[in-house]
Image: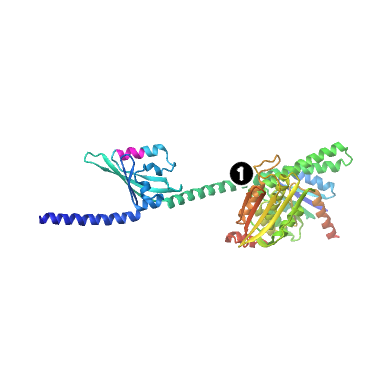
Amino acid sequence: MSAIVIDDDHDMVEVLSELLKIKGVDVVAKGYDGNDAVTAYKILKPDIVFLDLMMDNYDGFFALENIRRIDPNAKVVIITADENYETKQKLKKLSPTKVFHKPLEIDEVMNLLGTFEDFDS
Amino acid sequence: MLSDIVSCQFDLKRIERLLKIQHALDLHSIIGITDTNGIITYVNKEFCRISKYAEDELIGQDHRILKSGFHSDEFYTGMWKTISSGRIWRGSVKNMAKDGSFYWVKTIIVPLLDEFGKPIEYVSIRTDITKEKELQERLAESTNKLVSAERFSAIGELSSRLAHDLRNPLSVIKAEVDIFKFKNKNSDEKTLQSCQRVENAVAKITYQINTVLDFVRTKPLHLDKNSVSSIIESTLSNIVIPDRIKIISPQTDTVIICDSHQLEVVFENLITNSIQAMENDGTVTIRVIEENNSVIIQIEDTGDGIPDEIVPKIFEPLFTTKHKGTGLGLASVKNIIEQHQGKISLKNNPTTFTIRLPQQLKLPLEEKLTIDSIP
């Protein structure tokens, strides 16, 4: 299973990528804003996108919207530290595959990935 | 002779006219006369009505009988200085009536002077402005509230930014611990305990951030028809109830329009408070009473109660008597209840929190819109 990891916090990108690798996920690209996410998605078509929301310049909303345009069934998992009501409402309209809140429970992510694999096979 | 009669008749007419004018004045104004020592020599009906004294209780009394204690001594000396030198004084005065209630009067005091320009007596004409003053005070109060609401929303915004910025590094710490654990699967007990402590610390900070945010962020209500006792049951299933605590659930039930999740937060706070107050030994009784168009929910415990001196403070944000409390529990409770246009109060002996909620909650239009938009 291939994935890209997008977060403006570089440490977060590194640590999440490492964690995913341990769990057997192939991290094919790392990015630091919404534009990186869209570009990486276009080129690499990963199975899954791990996407932060609040990023400078191009944010996660931008990325989600544009990735959905490329592939309405793309699996985009939002990992955010933002729990604002407005954010939730705005996000709902863009129908992300799943939303996780920071600090991240890696087991929850793995459970989710498990359901994807079942789905694929 | 004839001219005398004419002038006499003329005087009578003048007096008659003056009396009529006085009558008109009496209908509107509070009129009093004092001598140069401030002893009351005349009051009209309005004076008696507003001060709630009878005429004979006032005549012969010092005017200070009406002093409210609101104004400074300088205020009164200034007034006396003005009128005793023969000048007119104008101002607004807060007085106290016989029954201890207060009233405001817009006042003019006119000294009547002798031929040498010295005052003989003072005529005061006053208008009741109590209602206007009350309005002014209420306006000032609501302006204050508005200002603090604005400040609060600024704090809310700041806090959610801060929370966001704290969760990111927390996430890194937590993930690093996860990685460490994977890489060191065969670590000794001590290392595993260290990891556990880091994880606990992260969890604690996360919890703290979330409780503070819950409080500073007023969430819009998700209204629905709910059974009160089912909300209470669901709350109880989420609380760890110690063995020696007995919970008596409500015997009655009623349906109410409310945000069930928010009310669960309310009940959870109150019930856990009770359990803690009873030091894990005692009984919590929950009652649901329907009254007119309100639902009354009472949570009573057999604890020692809340000391009188802190009762007025318990709903204030950041007030706590617990070592590990955030001081936001009851403040959140009050917020949620007020959002439901309800009221919460506390009574000791036995310690009872009483919540009164409207059964058919109606919200302003704009809030309704956000509610409708939630699927």
The residue positioned farthest toward the left in the image shown = B1
Q: Quadrant of residue B109?
A: top left
Q: Is residue B181 left or right of residue A43?
A: right
Is residue B276 inside the magenta stretch? no
Within 10 angstroms of label 1, few (less than 14), some, or many (20 or more) residues?
few
Instruction: Tell me if I can see residue B375 in this picture.
Output: no
Residue A36 in picture, x, y percent from top left: 72, 50
Quadrant showing the N terminus of chain B: bottom left
Colouring of the image: rainbow
- Rendered position, B168 above or below A118: above
Is residue B82 inside the magenta stretch? yes
Task: Kindly identify which chain the residue marked by label 1 belongs to.
Answer: B
Q: How many marks?
A: 1
Q: Residues in magenta?
A: B78-84
Closer to us: B121 or A35: B121
Inspect the image, locate mark 1, and give the three-letter code of the amino acid beneath it: Lys
Residue B142 in picture, x, y percent from top left: 51, 50
The residue tagged 1 is B313
Q: Quadrant of residue B82?
A: top left
Instruction: Tell me if I can see residue B60 in this picture.
Output: yes
Closer to us: B16 or B154: B16
Q: Is residue B23 left or right of residue B222?
A: left
- Name the dominant secondary structure of the magenta segment: helix
